[in-house]
Amino acid sequence: MKKFNINIHQNSFWYIVTYSGIIVLFVLVGIFPLYHYNSNLIEDNKKLKNQIEEQKKLGPAYLTLLKTMNNKDSHVLPNPEKTTILRGETGKFQDDVRMIAGKAGLTMVSLKPDLSTLAGSSTSLLHNIVLKGEFANFRKMLIGLEAVPYLDRIEEISILQYPDSLEFRMKIWIAIK
C-alpha cells in the first residue's frame, strides 16, 4: 500500500486548525442554542394552537353559561302573594295540578281531596297526590306548585323507587275561604 502523504506548510496547517476551531466554536455557540430556541418556540406554538382549538370548541358552551348567568329570571323562584280560594272553586286546584304535572313531564296517578278536612270552619283543604316520573321532572313540578298563590303548604313528600320510574306521593294543603 502506498502511503498517503500530504505536504502542507506548517503555517497553513495552523490556519486550517484555527479556522476549523472557529467554525466548530460558531456551531457550538451559535447554531445549537438557536436550534433549541427554535424547537422551544415550535412547541410553544403547538401548545397555543391546541389552546385556541380548545377555546373554539368550548366557546359555545361558555356563551351559553354567560347567557344563563346573565338571565336573572332563571334563578328566581316563583313567590306569588299568598291568597285563598273560595270553597266552591277548589276543583280549580286539581286542574292546576294536572296542568303543572303535564308541563313538568310527570304522569298523574291520582289526585284526591280529603273532604274530612273541609268540615266546619276549616281554612285549609288537604289533597293527596300521587305522580310517576323522573326526579328532575319532580323538581320542575315543585317549582310549578310554588307559583300557585293559594297553596298553603306541602305537608309530606314520599318517594318510592319502582323498576320503571319513581312514584311521588304528596300531601298538599290549600288555603280556602
Image (spheres, rainbow, N blue to C red):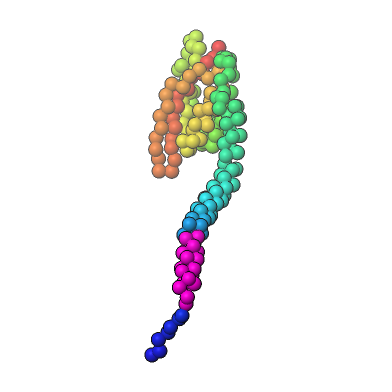
Q: Is residue 55 left or right of residue 13?
A: right
In the rendered image of this protein, does residue 167 appear above or below residue 147? below
In the rendered image of this protein, does residue 176 appear above or below residue 138? above
Between residue 40 and residue 126, name the one nearer to us. 40
Between residue 61 and residue 30, name the one nearer to us. 30
For the point 48% across and 26% down, which residue is it?
112
- Dominant secondary-structure state across the stretch colored magenta: helix
Q: How many marks?
A: 0
In the rendered image of this protein, does residue 39 appear above or below residue 60? below
For the point 46% across and 36% down, which residue is it?
135
Q: Quadrant of the N terminus?
A: bottom left
Q: Position of residue 40 (x, y in %)?
A: 50, 53
For the record, the magenta segment spans 8-27
Extreme residue in the top direction: 121
For the point 40% across and 86% down, which residue is it?
3
Q: Quadrant of the C terminus?
A: top right
Q: Position of residue 36 (x, y in %)?
A: 48, 56
Q: Position of residue 109 (x, y in %)?
A: 48, 34
Between residue 158 and residue 46, name the one nearer to us. 46
| Residue 98 position by quadrant | top right
* Residue 81 lies in the magenta stretch: no
* Residue 25 lies in the magenta stretch: yes
Q: Position of residue 87 (x, y in %)?
A: 56, 15
For the point 53% across and 27% down, which residue is it?
143
User: Is residue 20 something one can see in this rendering?
Assistant: no
User: Is residue 72 something one can see in this rendering?
Assistant: yes
Extreme residue in the bottom direction: 1
| Residue 85 position by quadrant | top right
In the rendered image of this protein, does residue 158 appear above or below residue 119? below
Q: Is residue 91 left or right of residue 169?
A: right
